Amino acid sequence: MRAYVLQVTQATLALLLAPGLVGLIRWMKARLQNRRGAPMWQPYAELRKLFQKEVIVSSNASWVFRAAPFLVFSSTVAVTLLVPILAVPLPFDRVGDLLVVVYLLLLGTFFLALAGLDVGSPFGGMGASREMTVAALAEPAIALAIFALALSAGSTNLGQIVARTLAHPGTALSPGHLLAFGALFVVTLAETGRLPIDNPATHLELTMIHEAMVLEYSGRYLALIEWAAATKLLIFFSLLGNLFIPWGVAVALTPATVAIAVFSLLAKFIVLAGTVAVLETRIAKLRLFRVPELLSVSFLLGLLAVTSSFLLR
Amino acid sequence: MTPEHLLLAVVFSYGTGALAAIVVGGAVGRGLVAGCALLAALSGVMLGVICLGAEHAPTVSAPFLPLTSFSLRIDGLSAFFLILIGIVGAAVSVYGFGYSAAYEGRYSLRLLGAMLNILLLSLSVQVMADNALTFLVAWEAMSLSAYLMVLTEHDRPGTLRAAHWYIAITHASFAALVGMFLLLSAGDLTTSFSAMRSALLTPGVRNAAFVLALLGFGAKAGIVPLHVWLPMAHPVAPSHVSALMSGVVIKMGIYGLVRVTIDLLVGGPSWWGGLVLGIGTVSALLGVLYALMEHDLKRLLAFHSVENIGIIFIGLGAGLLFQSYGLMTLATLSVVGGLYHTLNHACFKGLLFLGAGSVLHATGTRNMEELGGLVKRMPRTAFFFLVGACAISALPPLNGFASEWLVFQALLGGSAIPQAEVALIMPIAVAMLALTSGLAAACFVKAFGITFLAIPRTPVAERAHESPVSMQAGMLTLAVACVALGLAPFVIVPLLESSLAGLNGFTATTVVFTPALPLQVPGTFGQMSAPLLAVGLAVLLTLVPLALRILGADQRLRVGDTWGCGRIGQTPRMQYTATAFAEPLRRIFAELYRPTRDLSIDFHPASKYFVQSIEYRSEIHPWFERVLYGGLVLVIRTTARWVRRLQGGSLHLYLLYMALAFLVLLTVARWWR
Amino acid sequence: MGTFAVLLGPPLLAALLAGVVNPYRRFVGWANGLLSLLSVAAAVTLWRHVVAGQVLTSGSREFLRADALSTLLTLCVSVVAALAAWLGPGMGDDDGYDGAQARRFRIFGNLFAVTMLFAVTSNNLGFMWIAIEATTITSAMLIPLHVTKASVEASWKYILIGSIGIALAFGGTVLGYFDFVNLVGRHDEALNWTTLMASAPHLHPQVIQLAFIFILIGYGTKAGLAPMHTWLPDAHSEAPAALSAMMSGVLLAVALYAVIRWKIVVDAAIGTEFTNHLLIGMGLLSLIVAGFSLVIQRNYKRMLAYSSVEHTGLMCVGLALGPLGTFASMLHLLNHTVAKSMMFFLAGRVLHRYRTTEIAAVSGLLATMPWTGGLFAVGMLAVMGLPPFGLFMSEFALFRAGFVAGRPWLMGLVLALLTVAFVSIIGHLNRMLYGASAGGVPVGERPAWPLLPLGVCLTTLVVLGITLPTPLQTLLDRIVEVIGQ
Amino acid sequence: MDGMFSQLSVLGSSLVLIFGLILLWRRGVTAYIAAFRWQSIVLALVTAIVAYFAADHELYWVAGALLLLKGVVIPGLLKRMERRFPAERELDPYVNTATSLVVAGLLVLFGYAITRPLVALSQLPTRAGMPLAMGLVLVSLFVVISRKKALTQVVGFLMLENGLALLAILGTYGIPLIVELGVFLDVLMGFLVMQIFIYQIHETFESIDVEQLNHLRH
């Protein structure tokens, strides 16, 4: 019974931390660019404001436009129930593995793209087309990263992967794991719409992909979508953190280990957020037709990960 | 109800359906056709369900065919395919009742109705055939009835050419099958399957038989080099026929391949599995890539059939590969994954074609660039099409995801293969499969988005109306089937598994099913519970709006204009089109597509700087179609032109041929011995 | 002796009647039709006798003899002759032929039938040759029924190539007789097939091989085997439909019968290897030439002619594949006769309505003449060897025999050639059946009753496709015994 | 005795062959008809010789019929036809005279090679003439192929018949009488039909040049 409670707390914790994580990245980028930047909890304020605002829906839109925010949000929350953020042997672990996680996120993107098309504006169409292209090209890289992890762990089940890496610390430093980490990191940038692929901070139609799809949303719908995007970022960070550097993830469900797990989680988030912030200040956005080259780099990393784990088996 | 009674019921009601179609015309005729077909399809499903688990496979034989005799045997594999035919057949016949009403005056409804019943009958007989002659007769009857139905709208441009390509490639595959079966029967005159199973064949003959089977069944299934007829024939056929063809008829290629390679040839060397896996991967990728570029709704769906057949071939290929290495658990898993995807594809592809059919029925056009905004005018068809689109893009709660997940697990199991260089195929196949499913999702966002959402682009789309009830009923059955199959893999997989148990080498209990809901694949990799996932999503979908209401989020909602950078009017031309949607991918995969571009600008007579009109045309012709088929046709036509010159008209030439033949044979006879 | 009289008598009588009644009147046609039924009845009685195991002979010196092989051929000839009698010129009122032409058809058509019947029942190989030469003469008279540039050209080519071929066949008969004379000495029954068979094992190999070459080239010309097939497309595209039906349906079969008679003798003398190689070579050549000539074809009657060359080639290949192959090729002979004669009659009706043999000019056939068009389409599917019909069964039996006889590559090649032919024919068929019906072509089936016998032909094809009736099975087994001797 | 018989028969058959070769050498149709007439007469003579030496009375009937049919009737009809189409000379056949003579020579040699087993097998004194008969068959086949005029082709065909009849007589002292009569009847009927067609060709094409008969193609 305690496991189920922990599962739910883990999900609520993820939801609560997500906007903060985005705020943290923005704050760090501001500091790096010698700006004071908005405080870390700024996203929370934005969400609260949006939930109070009235929703304006385009006359062209159909029920798909209205249903999309709820679908995106609930699929992302479902993923937080599956991913090992704090502890490992959780009851919902049997419900879905890494493949289910990837495809649930694809479900969210699918409906978001449809909503973008539904309003009939060129921005929505452009955003949907580019988002689906990037999502499609990212798929092989994720698949290979999963294959590499599954090879060393013997299963695609998240819990088993974390447990196996904890049991055999040597595999964490094996070239397979490192290359898979690299591949998954590039994919994270692509999936969550971070800089080299998509610029989260702009509304310029040339550079925005994720923003273009949600241009028409307002009020509580926009809040839900922003929150879901933030949670998606958190999910990818926790995947990067816990699957590849699993130390700190609670194995026994005692208050002490859970506390350690929370602190190690926060530490990993800060490190990852820092790297992303530095990365986003250093490099400029890639032209859309250069993005496949970046994704083929990550595909190559994945392939090397798999071959190396094959040869070393 | 013993199997024999059910079998009689199936054959009898299809027969009466065909007869009724010819005898009775008009609405009553259509009603009878649909009724009989529905009754027969349902009894087919019951027959399948009964025989799926049965220990002994019931056999029926009748002294019909002259040379060998007409014998049927319903083992597990046939039972599974009977169910598949029944489900899609039922939906299509109900849908057909409403859809063919539009053909009343223009085309011969009698032929269409009769051929529909004969097609379904030959499909059912085909999967139960127990000797080569029955199989071949049913195969050709199936191809012929499908061909005649493709020809219903014969006055439209392109129908004759498409039908000709269809029957040409189908007959070539038929010739390959005749050769294969005779190679397999190796002298046994009854050509019965049981004799083939025990026949001792040299490896050379087995390989030849396998290659012929791959060619014959592959051409019918529509794998890449032989798929050319599929995007031509399916769009021109009436929609319920293309649903049946895409859903069931191309699956006969899958059934045949499984029956021959796994049952009759009892597995083979590992290059068999490798070849099938390779072909599957290439078909999946090329299928979806060419589907992306289509803006004819039914051609897009036809290319997707090629993609999904590729995925099924990946499952079968992995199964064969594992069988050759003796890893029976993985072999069963992958073949079960392939067959499960066959059933799923039959359902959601059938649903999508029926949806496209009602769009065609309502607007009269298949071109996505002329549609749009249909979700408000045809809400139920739109919903069904959306269910189909989510299923084919393998989104979690639906059936596409369940079978694709199984195929992924099978491929991930590839690491168990001892030889490293062979095991390396698996990750590449995984990557290609993932890319395919990603592109499929993109393609169906385009298909659903451009066709159904936003503003209607032409007055025709403006005046669209919801399709009649019978068509919706057809779509509803298949949609329910998709959702049910998606939610209950833990029921479907053991049934599939027992259908394979009959084939030697496949043990019965490899995929363990704990009473708990999750689908477990012990000893290998994954665990997933589709029902729990669906329940979770449903709970969240109700909880979130409730929470918003309770926590006092603002509930007001106002309808306004779409943001157009300050412009006042919102014209349909400002929307994204299908070609525009696919433009990024066309540019990325330009080397494959090699799009031809021609731009014609006629300038204003006054000066070079003013333009009267610009016409931009860009076409994509699959290059291998030009190379492979263009080459073949060229070779045949040049030989034909050369042979034609023999009959040149001059009597002296004719006499010269005769004299030369005479002299040559005289020398041969004189110095023969 | 009675059955032979009833077999050969009626056509002679009909020819005499047509000759006597100078201004042609329609009762001659009806009489001819009824008389032809008599010879069909005689053929059936022969069949019953053979099934019961007796071989009927006539006269003291076994002048006429009807064993299983001859009975099958008599059956085919009498049935097609009956069809030609009922559906030929001079029955309806406006079937495009005036009185004189109808009278000429009735005279020479019946003579043509008699000579063919005489050829297949005569025991004496010399008389067989005379009869087949007579068939050439009588059928040549009928080709230019409508005197046009094309029909004159076709008839001249037919008579010249045919006569030269037949002369060579006479050379073969002489050489066979020479071989026999050197062995046994001269006496009158020397050329009887039974006596020849009795002394066949001791015949001189070199001479009998030479004789068989003469026979194969000679009778091969009449059978339309490549490269001597060149007269066939011209003759069929110009001859009246009834004559083309008789020629394509049965004359080719009768010539093949003659080749088989001599093949049995040669096989008894030097074993089957020599003749099999020759037959496979000629058969394959016919398949190749006919298959590729069908690809670019603009005339539907020539298309049917080339299809006959193709099927004759297939029968030749079948004959060389051992007893199973012979069984299949004889069944194929029967199926092909029924199917091809039906097709030519239908082609005749289409020509009569559309006035042109160009495939491109005939469009919307299903719209203008639904029943003829339907029968034409289904018949064409039967000729191409699709399942529900008999031709598929015989072709499948043939392929099975090929694989059993250990010649998979040959069967593969034959399958490929048949597919090329199928694909081209179905293309031409589509162009004729569908599309807008040509302007000015009256719709409807004016003389509808001829469709009845053609429908009967189609049902026989379907029956032969579904089951093999036991009397036919025993007849074919007896033939395999005769040929396998 | 046999010596005289075989020498006479060989002389006769070589004469028959020589008349055949005239077709290749001369141009006018009248020459062809004369050659055919004399060839038939010599053939009848050879038959009579064989009948005399083999003391076979039936052969006398055959010789008489041969003389009547091929010596008198058919040449007469040919003459009548030739008068109807006077302008028809064999101007430029496909193969000029020199090459056709060389080809004829080669064909006769080929005939010799082919009939060697026949000669070896046969015990009859007349066996030496058989290669010449086979040579005539091949040469007349060549004539039919290389000449353009329909009339010449008919004469070539008749010579082919003569060659085969000669072969039958030399090889087997003639085939049984009934069959022989049937053969004569067929040859006559065949010739009559050809005659009718030649008149028809002349009517529709205004000339009996076979080269223009090439409308039916493919």
Image (cartoon, coloured by chain):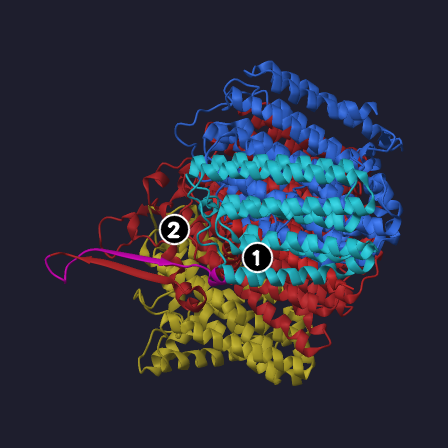
Tell me, yes or no, if residue D175 can be seen here.
Answer: yes
On screen, residue B125 versus residue B363, left or right, reads right
- x, y (%) of residue C113? 68, 29
- The image shows residue B384, relative to residue A22, as above or below, that is above
Q: Given the image, what chain letter belongs to the residue carrying mark 1?
A: B
> In which quadrant is the C terminus of chain B drawn?
bottom right
Q: Nearer the viewer, residue D74 or A216?
A: D74
- Quadrant housing residue B49: top right
Q: Residue B116: tell me if it is visible.
A: no
Query: What chain is tagged by disc 2?
Result: A
Callout 1 secondary element: helix
* Nearer to the camera, C99 or A97: C99
Q: Amino acid at mark 1?
A: Leu
The magenta span reads B606-628
Chain B: give its colour: red
Q: Quadrant of residue B40?
A: top right
Residue identified by numbered label 2 = A118
- Please give the letter of the chain rendered in yellow: A
For residue B226, the mark is: 1
- In the displayed structure, does residue C207 sit left or right of residue B565? right
Question: Which residue is depicted at the point 61% across and 20% down?
Answer: C19
Colour that chain C carries in the picture:
blue
Circle 2 Cα neighbour tier, 10 Å, few/some/many (<14 / 14–19 / ≥20): many
Query: What color does chain D have in the rendering?
Result: cyan
Q: Which mark is residue B129?
A: none
Q: Is residue B337 above or below residue C78?
A: below
**Which label lies toward us, 1 or 2?**
1
